[in-house]
Structure formats: C-alpha cells, structure tokens
Amino acid sequence: MNTMIKVIFILAFAYPGFVQADDFKKSDLKRWREQFDEVADEGRRLFTSPDLGSNGVVCAQCHPNGANTHPETYPKFQKQLGRVAMMWEMVNWCILNPLEGKPLDADDPEMIAIHAYLAKERKGVQLDPGRH
C-alpha cells in the first residue's frame, strides 16, 4: 500500500470520529422534513399564484404540478438562453417572459421555495444532468 492510502486507512478506522457525520435524531429528521415541506408548500403557492408576474399568468398554466420542468436534468443547455444554465436561470426566464415579472436572485427565499416544490414533485426521479 502506498503511504497516502495507509494514512487514509489509519484515519478512517483508527480514529472513527474523523470520518463520522454529525449525529442527529429522529426528531431532527422530522423537524427538517416539516421545514422542507413548508418551503415546498410555499413554492406551490407561488407556482399557482399570479404574485410572480404582472399580467395574471401563473407558472402552473404551462407547467401544471411542475410538469415539464425536469429539475433533475439541470444544469443543461437551454435554447432560450443559448447556453448551459442552472434551473434558477430558467425559472427567471419564465418569470421575465411569460409572467412579465421581475427576476429573483438564486438565493431568494421565493426561488428556493419554487425549487423545493419542483424537486418535491419529481422526488424519486434519477438525476440526469444535461438530458433533454
């Protein structure tokens, strides 16, 4: 065995605390799931509400239940943008164009909520970045 592999082996097995994840309880998992669900519910509200735009159009008119959004395929080439893009950029394209609204920052709580909702709708679908 080379020296680097020996060091990793020793650290991993001789000092188990070195490679362990944080401890958490079932109550933590429950609380985190509830928080995710709350954020995803807000994303659904935004997705079905005219609040993101100025013309009464809502995301769900083109994408009922998040259809044809495929968050599992990002990043990927987007024809509308002419380049490989992240999903938040495509969400903003839709907000700017069909909804005639103002774009959101990638870390805006409303953008995060929309992403959470779309991810929840596609839960269980295998990641496949770049696929069309």
Image: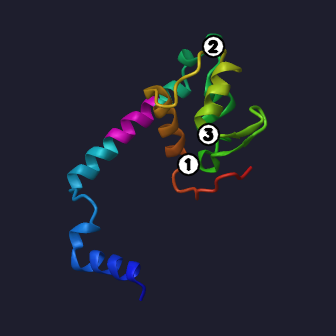
Give the residue at mark 2.
Answer: 56
Q: Amino acid at mark 2?
A: Gly
Tell me which label, 1 or 2, sits earlier in the chain.
Answer: 2
Please tell me whether mark 3 sits on a helix, a strand or a loop. loop
Q: Which residues are magenta?
A: 35-42
Q: In this picture, is 48 found above or below 2? A: above
Residue 106 among those drawn in magenta: no
Q: Residue at x 71, y 53 (%)?
A: 131
Q: In this picture, is 16 found above or below 102? A: below
Give the residue at mark 3.
Answer: 86
Give the residue at mark 1.
Answer: 122
Colouring chosen for the image of the structure: rainbow
Q: Residue at x 66, y 19 (%)?
A: 96
Classified by dominant secondary structure, the portion drawn in magenta counts as helix
Q: Residue at x 63, y 46 (%)?
A: 74
For this rendering, which residue is in front, 101 or 43? 101
